[in-house]
Image (cartoon, rainbow, N blue to C red):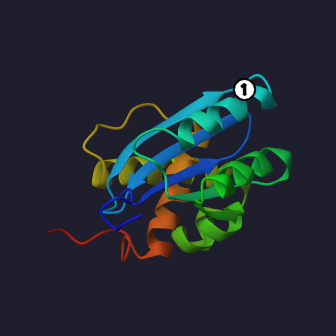
């Protein structure tokens, strides 16, 4: 495969669960979309994963918060498709993106995530923010962490151009 045949890099951020939050970023840090899915069972999640990882634009990197059997479904599919797969826990991205006072508990951290996700949408998306569920807000921030980790974004907040 030549470099011109390779898809442009895209990062899919996932807050794993049957209530799944998702966000897709381009390599230039543009937030393309964000959403939430409420799934009844693991089989529906498995179908969603297969669809998302084969949809255009193709994710080349997956940053996922969570563990257990649901995270393993994502990991197996990512490996099949040769996606870069990074698994984190909430403490990792919160430590980088929040001050300590902004995440003394899970409840406070979720409130802070909602506020910060709106800021990310305003700065990195062409769309206006919509009502967010906490899982979607966290996926947006997991993606922000991934952008910084990959060097696709050098600092947050980005400097005005």
Vertical placement of residue 34 versus 105, above or below = above
The crowd level at tag 1 (other Cα within 10 Å; few <14, some 14-19, many 20+) is few
Residue at 40% across, 47% down: 118
Residue 29, percent across and down? Answer: 34, 61
Spot the residue most to the right: 68
Residue at 80% across, 26% down: 41
Say which quarter of the image contains residue 93.
Answer: bottom right
> Is 116 displayed left or right of 21 in the figure?
left
Vertical placement of residue 104 versus 56, above or below = below
Quadrant including the C terminus:
bottom left
Vertical placement of residue 161 versus 133, above or below = below
Say which quarter of the image contains residue 67.
Answer: bottom right
Vertical placement of residue 62 versus 40, above or below = below
Quadrant including the N terminus:
bottom left
- Residue closest to the eye, 146 or 73: 73
> Is 156 displayed left or right of 43 in the figure?
left
Residue at 36% across, 71% down: 153
- Residue closest to the eye, 121 or 74: 74
- Residue closest to the eye, 80 or 136: 80
Helix, strand or loop for disc 1: helix
> Is 20 displayed left or right of 17 in the figure?
left
Residue 146, percent across and down? Answer: 51, 66
> Is 64 displayed left or right of 70 in the figure?
left
Spot the residue most to the top: 40
Residue 47, percent across and down? Answer: 67, 30
Residue at 41% across, 76% down: 151
Residue 28, percent across and down? Answer: 30, 63
Residue at which label 1 appears: 44
């Amino acid at each position: 495969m030549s470099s011109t045949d390779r898809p442009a890099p895209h990062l899919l951020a996932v807050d794993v669960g049957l209530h799944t939050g998702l966000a897709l970023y381009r390599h230039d840090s543009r937030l393309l979309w964000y959403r939430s899915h409420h799934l009844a069972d693991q089989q529906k999640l498995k179908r969603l994963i297969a669809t998302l990882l084969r949809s255009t634009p193709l994710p080349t990197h997956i940053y996922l918060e969570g563990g257990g059997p649901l995270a393993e479904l994502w990991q197996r599919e990512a490996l099949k498709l040769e996606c870069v797969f990074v698994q984190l826990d909430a403490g990792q991205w919160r430590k980088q993106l929040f001050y300590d006072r902004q995440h003394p508990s899970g409840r406070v951290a979720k409130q802070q995530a909602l506020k910060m996700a709106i800021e990310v949408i305003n700065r990195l998306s062409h769309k206006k923010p919509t009502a967010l569920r906490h899982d979607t807000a966290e996926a947006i921030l997991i993606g922000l962490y991934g952008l910084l980790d990959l060097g696709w974004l050098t600092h947050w907040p980005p400097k005005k151009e």
